[in-house]
Image (tube, rainbow, N blue to C red):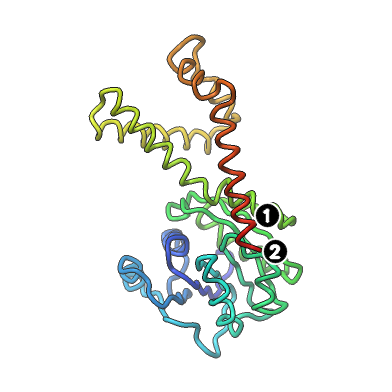
């Protein structure tokens, strides 16, 4: 990090835990992190103990932090946010990663203080995530820079200033890893149905998706060009894509799935 600062993580479940592991792996000073969680799971407790991260079951009194990252489940935000008002202030930027919790809802509980609504995803645990952030008007440029540096430690960061985009971001990248994992499940199952041993089918599906993902991340060509490059006319790939792309089957299904996820994100904020 460009400057040393104090970080408080509220909630060390799947998303918070993934981000914490990414920060530690990237070299963020463990002695500058405080984790607030009443009942972290055993693997998380082991991680905290291993690195000497301070752990508290509830928000401490008379404590100020530079960045407070709130990573509790959306359904728990109404119960948790009122307990955090004492940690918020003009010198603290509060960052929420909860789907569907708006900037207005956050400031209603925390006060008119700097707040950033963000949507990361779980590849953060491998420092391969992507996070989209939307700040409120109280955030200074320095605070936004600090948040960007913090989240850059676990992957790429993009900023938007139209909060309405966050619901669509949630549907594409926030939930997106689950879509890819399901694709791997389907590919492995199809391989078994075609006569492959389960362990070989699983390995082929995993490594194919991982390799293709690396190409998408590291090469400049658009996804469509990469697809065309591997598709020989009248070949095996073309035969498969005829099933996936004929009548826009996969495209329509993915669009329908992402639309459902966006609607659910909007419902959570209602």
Residue picked out by circle 1:
159
**72 versus 124 height, above or below:** below
The quarter of the picture where the C terminus appears is bottom right
Q: Is residue 191 left or right of residue 99?
A: left
Give how far across and how far down residue 137 sits, in percent: 76, 68
Q: Position of residue 251 (x, y in %)?
A: 58, 31
Residue drawn at x 49%, y 13% as measured from the top left: 232
The x and y percentages for residue 55 are 40, 78
Q: Is residue 19 left or right of residue 151?
A: left
Task: Locate residue 62, reporting x and y percent.
Answer: 55, 90
| Residue at x 56%, y 59% (from the top left corner) | 151
Give whichever of 122, 90 is nearer the camera.
122
Placement of the N terminus among the 4 image quadrants:
bottom right
Left or right of 8, for residue 202: left
- Which corner quadrant of the image does residue 182 belong to? top left
Q: Is there CB contact under 8 Å for labels 1 and 2?
A: yes
**Residue wearing tag 2:** 135
How many residues crowd mark 1 within 10 Å: few (<14), some (14–19), many (20+)? few
The residues bearing labels 1 and 2 have C-alpha atoms spaced at a distance of: 8 Å
Seen in the picture, residue 15 relative to 29 is either above or below; the reply is above
Q: Is residue 248 above or below residue 94?
A: above
Name the foreground residue: 124 vs 220: 124
Residue 172, image quadrant: top right
């Amino acid at each position: 990090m460009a400057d040393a600062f104090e970080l408080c993580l509220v909630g060390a479940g799947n998303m918070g835990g993934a981000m914490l592991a990414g920060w530690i792996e990237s070299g963020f000073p463990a002695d500058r992190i405080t984790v607030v969680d009443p009942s972290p799971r055993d693997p998380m407790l082991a991680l905290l103990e291993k690195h000497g991260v301070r752990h508290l079951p509830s928000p401490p009194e008379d404590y100020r932090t530079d960045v407070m990252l709130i990573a509790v489940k959306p359904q728990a935000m109404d119960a948790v946010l009122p307990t955090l008002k004492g940690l918020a202030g003009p010198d603290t930027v509060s960052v929420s990663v909860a789907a569907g919790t708006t900037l207005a809802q956050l400031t209603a509980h925390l006060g008119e203080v700097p707040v950033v609504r963000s949507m990361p995803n779980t590849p953060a645990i491998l420092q391969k995530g992507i996070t989209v952030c939307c700040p409120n008007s109280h955030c200074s440029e320095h605070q936004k820079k600090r948040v960007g540096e913090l989240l850059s430690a676990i992957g790429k960061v993009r900023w938007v200033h139209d909060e309405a985009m966050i619901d669509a971001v949630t549907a594409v990248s926030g939930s997106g890893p689950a879509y890819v994992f399901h694709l791997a499940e389907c590919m492995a199952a199809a391989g078994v149905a075609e006569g492959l041993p389960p362990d070989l089918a699983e390995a082929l599906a995993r490594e194919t998706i991982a390799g293709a993902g690396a190409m998408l991340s590291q090469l400049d060509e658009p996804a469509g060009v990469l697809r065309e490059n591997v598709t020989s006319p009248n070949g095996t790939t073309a035969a498969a894509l005829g099933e996936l792309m004929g009548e826009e089957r996969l495209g329509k299904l993915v669009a329908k799935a992402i639309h459902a996820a966006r609607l659910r994100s909007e419902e959570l904020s209602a």
